[in-house]
Image (tube, rainbow, N blue to C red):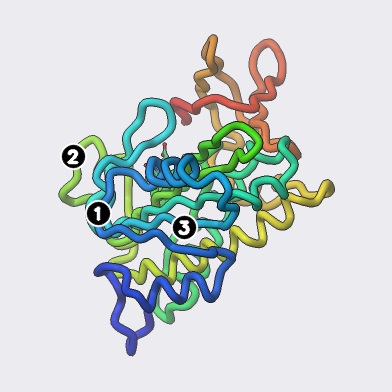
Amino acid sequence: MSDDTTPPTAAAFTAADLAQLVAETFVDHVDHHEEIDSTNTRAKQLADANPADRSTLLVLADHQTAGRGRGANTWWSAPGALTFSLLLRDRAHNLPAHRWPQLSLAAGLAICDAIDEVASNSRTLELAASQLKWPNDVYLAGKKLAGILVESTTGPTACIILGIGINVNNSFAAAPPELQTRATSLQDAAGPTFSRTEVLLAVLKGLAASLKSLQSAACSLRPAYSRRCLLTGRTVEVALHDRNITGKCQGIDDDGALLVETASGTERLSSGTVTRFV
Ligand code: BTN
């Protein structure tokens, strides 16, 4: 968050904010919208329309009206949320294909680290440690703070669209009741208004480091992920494409798969949705 002398930027992103994002991160261009349905949808349209363009693009919305989540889920966000999508073109190709599924884990870690950094930049702010619910959710104090939606295009110019929604200044006080019990924002958890630009810069800088380490064959996200894993040691119910399983979560392995100890042995899950955890 901003210190006492700097007014926090809860309002629209300014031209100076956008210039700073390009100057200080790996983003080549910003496609900024005051209001848009979904930044992931827009990023996909831009990828399809300009296959020869290999630059890294940030699609950024002040307010998203029809955000999409995993599967058929929607992403509800009132004004004040931080919603963006990264269109990774050549950067996707620099990553070995078997690493692509680990991008949402790497993004989750970058979000957690960014939140810690923003909190520690403040002299007064104390936030609980953020945690990761495999594979794509960030939790704060038991409620969902951020979600990640990774999509990709196919063919020789295939690229990755990494969509991230972080509840920053959007209070859930006015949200539908079922959301109030399940979701939180930085403002709800900590009180003050945060600079969305500061949070975004921190996430992008962390992501740059994650993308670089995912290129290395020796990299494992497991140690860092284990420190943040919300599910380790808990009983989890996981919906797979053809069945549901229940068991005790043993964390993730070096490839980012979830390990669940069931009555019939340890299951190694490379995809799925954790529908319940206790
Ligand atoms: C989930 O929790 O299921 C994933 C939510 C992802 C939401 C973000 S907001 C920015 C980007 N654009 C979208 O339409 N979705 C992602």
Using a 10 Å C-alpha cutoff, classify the residue at mark 2 as few (fewer than 14 neighbours), some (14 to 19) or many (20 or more): few
Counting residues from the N terminus, which is met first, the one under dot 3 or under dot 2? 3
Query: Please, is residue 44 above or below residue 118 in the view?
Result: above
Label 1 SS: strand
Label 2 SS: loop
Q: CA distance from mark 1 to mark 3?
A: 15 Å
**Horizontal and vertical percent for residue 163?**
46, 46
Q: Which residue lies under the disc numbered 2?
A: 176
**Horizontal and vertical percent for residue 251?**
65, 36
Q: Which residue lies under the disc numbered 3?
A: 58
- Residue 93 visible in the shown view: yes
Q: Residue at x 52, y 50 (%)?
A: 87
Q: CA distance from mark 3 to mark 2?
A: 30 Å
**Horizontal and vertical percent for residue 89?**
60, 49
Select label 3 or label 2 by which is in front: 3
**Horizontal and vertical percent for residue 117?**
52, 70
Q: Which residue lies under the disc numbered 1?
A: 35
